[in-house]
Amino acid sequence: MSLARRSFLTAALGLLLAGPWATPAGAALSPDDSAAIQRAIHYLNGIDTLKARFVQISSNGAYAEGSLLVDRPGKLRFDYDPPYPILMIANGLSFLYYDRELKQASFLPLWETPLWFLIRDKVKLTDDLEVLKVVQKAATLRITMRDRKSPEAGTVTLVFSDRPMALKKWEMVDSQGIVTQVSLVDPMFGVKIDDSQFDYGNLQIQGSQPPKGRK
């Protein structure tokens, strides 16, 4: 799996959790679909902390595992298991993409990355994404969407178990038709997470410094 694909994974996750539930031109949501989407929004807004393992499988044969921490608002940590040396941290002000082997980091202001929508204070409706399909069956809810400004980039599907609702995985189909599934394993919600998990001050970083943040 390339670094670009791992970066796309995280960006796609943050983007879809923004919750922009507009529909494509000419499409219409049924009352049941609209109600399901509103339940998903309510559920996502109710998440304060999340701790889980994740398993990532792609149709091109790539496989990876790792751990995920979320502390809303503002904080997130994706930590890939070896052999992938990638660590990604949002600390409330900026987003770090770090290669442990190369000791190289890329920094972006938090509000300029799709990750901001995952960990912002409130899931909000925007015009950025369009819902393509809502499927409810067998106690599962699937919401498929794409970026309104870049529809050629592919689609993202959120997969929830339903009644009670819980986020189980997300699936991405990129512009080349490669399907990537990321499943949460034993997720725990509302758990205490040590703030040090989002501190990257002790990392050895060559030649790059975080941007000055804003609140």
Image: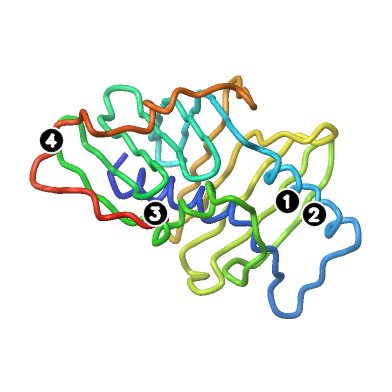
Select label 3 or label 2 by which is in front.
3
Residue 28 percent coordinates (x, y): 81, 71
Mark whose residue sits in front, 4 or 2: 2
- Which labelled disc corresponds to residue 190? none
Which corner quadrant holds the N terminus? top left
Report how far apart the C-alphas of labels 4 and 2 lie in the structure.
43 Å
Distance CA(mark 3)–CA(mark 1)? 22 Å
Marks 1/4: CA distance? 39 Å
Q: Where is mark 1, residue-wise?
A: 41
Q: Amino acid at mark 4?
A: Leu
Q: Quadrant of residue 111?
A: bottom left
Secondary structure beneath dot 2 equals helix
Viewer-proximal residue among 137 and 131: 131
Q: As shown in the figure, which amino acid type bears the numbered disc 3?
A: Leu
- The answer to the question of whether label 1 and label 4 lie on touching residues, with beta carbons closer than 8 A, is no
Compare marks 1 and 4 and give the one earlier in the sequence: 1
Q: Are marks 2 and 1 in contact (CB under 8 Å)?
A: yes
Q: Nearer the viewer, residue 74 or 38?
A: 74
Q: Earlier in the sequence, mark 3 or mark 1?
A: 1
For label 4, the SS is: loop
Residue under circle 4? 102
Q: Which mark is residue 110?
A: 3
Q: Amino acid at mark 1?
A: Ile
Q: Earlier in the sequence, mark 3 or mark 2?
A: 2
